[in-house]
Image (cartoon, grey):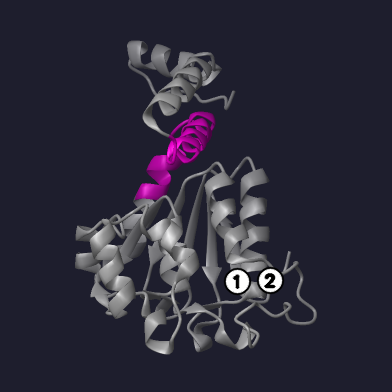
């Protein structure tokens, strides 16, 4: 399906989704988000896809929300005429990333600001070029990053996150890594290789067990301990009942590579 604001490409077991408005610093407007939702659904339903990589075209990952698509009251306007997908919201996108059932990797090729940072922290893993910068600069224009607080504070300590939000200051990839905002920073010329290596490593795991594990992770992240343990006990029983669990244990004992069936 043709997209106007993103690129979607499947390379072996990896689907790459690229924000593709580099002249505008890859903003996240309703059309872009709608296309991202469509691409995530395409990847979710494609059995050949095991891992999803999100990145940006050009020198910036994403500078955040598309201010030109905001109404006077701060609400998104309709997607542009002729869009191939329905417009989407940032709420839809965040929820879709928790429900796609396949590992998501943010390949942060450049600055990730505001909603762009929100997209990074919403992914399961984030690997960034060492010259990328990160910030929530909304406060500088009289706004507040309401939506991305939900994911930021699931990744970084409260006081450090609040300082970032209240000051709007940019931080380096090294600092972003040290506080847990991203997984790690790597030299810019090694970014592609690092992400590819991780994507292929994840693609070699059982897709069913990854799906079940990710679902359990997101289902329990806000539960109290007792109900979380009860839920996870049931999920462990479900995992042990899969053909892939039996195959994995047998392969381990036989010292061979597992042949995953996805069931």
Q: Position of residue 145 (x, y in %)?
A: 44, 72
Is mark 2 in CB contact (under 8 Å) with mark 1?
yes
Residue located beneath label 2 in the image: 3
User: Which residue: 50% across, 83% down?
Assistant: 22
Against 6, residue 228 (above or below) is above
Against 142, residue 15 (above or below) is above
Assess disc 2: are there few (<14), some (14-19) or many (≥20) residues with their C-alpha within 10 Å of its C-alpha.
some
Residue lying farthest to the right in this orientation: 82
Q: What kind of element bears circle 2?
A: loop
Assess disc 1: are there few (<14), some (14-19) or many (≥20) residues with their C-alpha within 10 Å of its C-alpha.
many
Which circle marks residue 174 in the picture? none
Q: Position of residue 124 (x, y in %)?
A: 42, 50
Query: Which of the two residues, 6 or 218, is positioned nearer the viewer here?
Result: 218
Quadrant of the snapshot with the C terminus = top right
Tell whether 206 sits left or right of 152: right
Q: Is residue 16 visible?
A: yes
Query: Which of the two residues, 166 or 69, is positioned nearer the viewer here?
Result: 166
Q: Is residue 209 magenta?
A: yes
Q: Quadrant of residue 173?
A: bottom left
Q: What kind of element bears circle 1?
A: strand
Give the main secondary structure, helix, strand or loop, of the magenta stretch: helix
Q: Which segment is the magenta one?
A: 198-223
Q: What's the distance in space between the residues labelled 2 and 1, CA to CA?
A: 6 Å
Residue located beneath label 1 in the image: 6
Quadrant of the snapshot with the N terminus = bottom right
User: Which residue: 57% across, 52% down?
Assistant: 95
């Amino acid at each position: 399906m043709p997209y106007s604001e993103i690129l979607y490409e499947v390379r072996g077991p990896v689907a790459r989704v690229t924000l593709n408005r580099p002249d505008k610093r890859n903003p996240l407007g309703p059309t872009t988000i709608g296309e991202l939702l469509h691409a995530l659904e395409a990847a979710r339903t494609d059995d050949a896809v095991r891992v999803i990589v999100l990145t940006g075209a050009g020198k910036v990952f994403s500078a955040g929300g598309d201010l030109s698509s905001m109404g006077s009251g701060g609400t998104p306007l309709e997607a542009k005429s002729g869009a191939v997908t329905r417009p989407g919201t940032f709420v839809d996108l965040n929820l879709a990333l928790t429900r796609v059932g396949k590992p998501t990797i943010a390949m942060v090729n450049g600055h990730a600001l505001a909603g762009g940072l929100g997209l990074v922290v919403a992914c399961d893993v984030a690997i960034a070029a060492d010259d990328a910068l990160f910030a929530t600069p909304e406060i500088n224009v009289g706004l507040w990053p309401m939506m991305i607080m939900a994911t930021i504070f699931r990744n970084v300590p409260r006081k450090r996150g609040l300082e970032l939000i209240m000051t709007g200051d940019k931080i380096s990839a090294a600092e972003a890594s040290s506080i847990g905002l991203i997984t790690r920073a790597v030299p810019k010329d090694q970014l592609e290789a690092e992400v590819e290596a991780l994507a292929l490593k994840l693609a070699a795991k059982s897709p069913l067990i990854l799906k079940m594990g990710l679902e359990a992770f997101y289902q329990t992240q806000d539960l109290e301990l007792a109900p979380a343990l009860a839920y996870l006990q049931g999920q462990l029983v479900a995992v042990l009942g899969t053909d892939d669990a039996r195959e994995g244990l047998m392969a381990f004992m036989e010292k061979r590579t597992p042949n995953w069936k996805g069931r």
